[in-house]
Image (spheres, coloured by chain):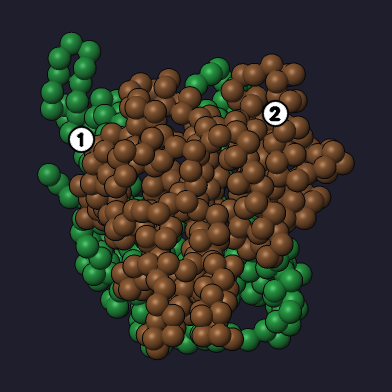
Chain colours: A brown, B green
Amino acid sequence: MTKSQNSVITLENVTVKYGAGTPFERVALDGVNISFPKNKITGIIGHTGSGKSTLATLLNGLLKPTAGVIRLEGEDIHRDKEFTNKIRFQVGLVFQYPEYQLFEETLERDIGFGPRNMGLSDDEIARRVEKAAEFTGLDAYTLKSSPFEISGGQKRRAAIAGVIAMEPSVLVLDEPAAGLDPMGKEEILGGLCDYKKKTLSTLLLISHNMEDIAKYADYILVLKEGKVFKFGSVAEIFSEADDLFNSSLDVPQITKLFIELKKRNVIDRTDIYTVGYGARAILAKLGESGL
Amino acid sequence: MIKDITIGQFFPGDSVLHKADPRFKIIALIIFLTMTLAAESTVAFLAVLFLTLALAALSKINPKVLFKSVRPLFFILIFTAVINLFFVKGETPLFKWSFIAIYKEGVINAVVMAFRLVCLVLGTSVLLSYTTSPLDMTDALERLLSPLKYLKAPVHEFSMMMTIALRFIPTLVEETDKIISAQKARGVSFDTGGLIKRVKALIPILIPLFYSAIRRAYELAEAMECRLYRGGEGRTRMKVLNVKAGDFIMIGVMLLACAGVFYLNNFELNI
C-alpha cells in the first residue's frame, strides 16, 4: 500500500456484515484497509461477490460499516449525521445502468436535481448544469428534451452528468460503460478522464473490462472474497497475471498474448497491457532480429 | 431492506397438504372457514380447534413458523379478550370490584373469541398460504372460476394478471431499492423536512418506478406475443392439475367435520 501517496479516502479496518446476528449473516467486507490516491484514477476489480458494490456504497456514506472508520480528507465521514449527509455531495456515486434514476420533465431539470438538493442558487445551478452537459457531450437541444424520449446512450450521459453537476471531488462509478458500444464507451470514459483532469478530482472506476482499466487507470485495487487482494500501479498488477487468473479475474488480451510469447521465449516482457505498447515491443524485437 | 418481504410465504414441502390439488384446497378452506365461524357451543368449538391443530400437524411446517403467522394478531387478540372479559354480562359473576364485574361467560367468550381468530388465521395459512405455491394458487383460481367464462367474465386474463403481478413483485421491490439508493446519492432525504417535503421526496422514486414497470410490461407483452401468446383460447398447460382420490377424501372429511360442528352446536359443556 502506497501510504506515502496523498490519500483522499481511506478505509481503516472496515468490516461490513449483512444480517449480523441472524442465520443469514454474510460478511461482505472483512477488515479492509484501503488508501485511495488523490487526483488519480483507480480501477477497482474483483470477482462477483468480492465486495465491490458494498465498497462503492460505503464511500459516499450511503452504507455505514459494521466496524471501522472511513475518512474523507482525514475526517471520519460518520462523525455526525449532518456531516454524513453532506458527504454524498463530495463523493459522487454513479450506479450501474444509472439511466433508471432519471425522472424530471427535462434533462436540464434532472441534471440540476443534485445541485438543487444542495441548496444552491439558480444561477449556480444553471452554470453547473451547463458544465456537466459539456463534459458528457449533451447539446442544448437534448437538454430541453424529456429523459424518456432520448436514446439509451444519451440517458447514460444524462445520469452521469447529474452526478458530475454536484462537482464532487471524488467520483465513484460502477461499470459506467456497461452495455455501450465501443464508441459510446470511449466517449463516456474519455469524458470522465477529461472531467478528472480539468477539475483535479479523483476517479474510482469499478469495472470488469480489463482493457478499459488498462487504458484509463493509474492504480488498481483488487478485491477478493471481501478482502484486499492487491493494490498497486496498473503495470504492477497486470504483471502478476497468474494471481489474477486464480481469482476468477482476467488480464487484457494483449497481456495474455505476451504471456504466451514469453512462454515460447520469443519476447521476455511482463509489463505490456495496452495494444500500443505491445506493438512497439513487437516492432522493437523485430528490429533486433534485423527484420 | 425491503427485499425481505416474502409474498404468500410459500414453504415448499412434501406433506399431504402440499400435494393436494390446490383447487380442492381452496374449496376445503371455504368449508373450514364456514365451520370455524359457525361454531357456537364450546363443544363445537373445541372440535374446530382440534381440527385446526390436526391440519397444522399434517402440513409438517415448523411450529416456530406457524407461531410467527399468529404473532401479528396478538394485539387484536388481547384487545378482543379484554373487551369480552369486562363487558360481557352473564349469569355467574366470578369477580366483582366496585363497577368492574367479570362473569364466567365473559371469560369463556374471551377465550373462544381469541382462539377462533387463531384458528382462522392458522387454518388459512396451513391449508393454503404456506402449502401452496403462488402459481398453483392462481392456476387453481383460474380453473375454479372458469365456468364464469360462459358469462363473458375475463377469467383467464384475470388469472394471468395475478400470475404476472406475483412474478414481478420481487423484481420491482429490488428496483425500488436501487432507485432509492441512486436518488439518495444525489441528495434526496426521506426522513427530514415537513410532510409536504417528504411527500415530494417520493416523486424521484415513483416516476422512475412507474416508467420502469410500464416499460417491463411492454417488453413482456412483446416477448409473449413473439411466442404466439394469444390469450386463453385453446391454451394448454405443462403442469396439468390432476384430481386424485385423496382430494375427494379431503373434501369429504371437511364436509363431515362441518356437519359435525353444526350438530355439536346443540350440545353445551358445563364447566
Q: CA distance from mark 1 to mark 2?
A: 71 Å
- Residue B80 visible, this orientation: no
> A114 left or right of B50?
right
Q: Residue at x 29, y 78 (%)?
A: B14
Q: Is residue B52 above or below residue B199?
A: below
Q: Residue at x 31, y 38 (%)?
A: A4
Instruction: Please state the horizontal and vertical placement of residue B204, each as a whole percent of the image.
Output: 63, 37
Instruction: Please state the horizontal and vertical placement of residue A173, each as a whole percent of the image.
Output: 53, 48
- Of B261 and B161, nearer the camera is B161
Graded by Cα atoms within 10 Å as few (under 14), some (14 to 19) or many (20 or more), the crowding at tag 1 reads some
Q: Residue at x 22, y 13 (%)?
A: B99
Q: Chain of mark 1?
A: B
Q: Which mark is residue B107?
A: 1
The residue tagged with tag 1: helix, strand or loop? helix
- Inspect the image, locate mark 1, and give the three-letter code of the amino acid beneath it: Val
> B157 left or right of B188?
right
Q: Farthest residue to the front: give it.
A: A290
Q: Residue at x 27, y 69 (%)?
A: B59
- Of B159 and A116, nearer the camera is A116
Q: Are marks 1 and 2 on the same chain?
A: no
Q: Chain of mark 2?
A: A
Q: Please identify the quarter of the rendering in which residue A132 is found.
A: top right
Instruction: Please state the horizontal and vertical placement of residue A286, each as a whole percent of the image.
Output: 55, 82
According to the picture, the residue beneath numbered tag 2 turns out to be: A128
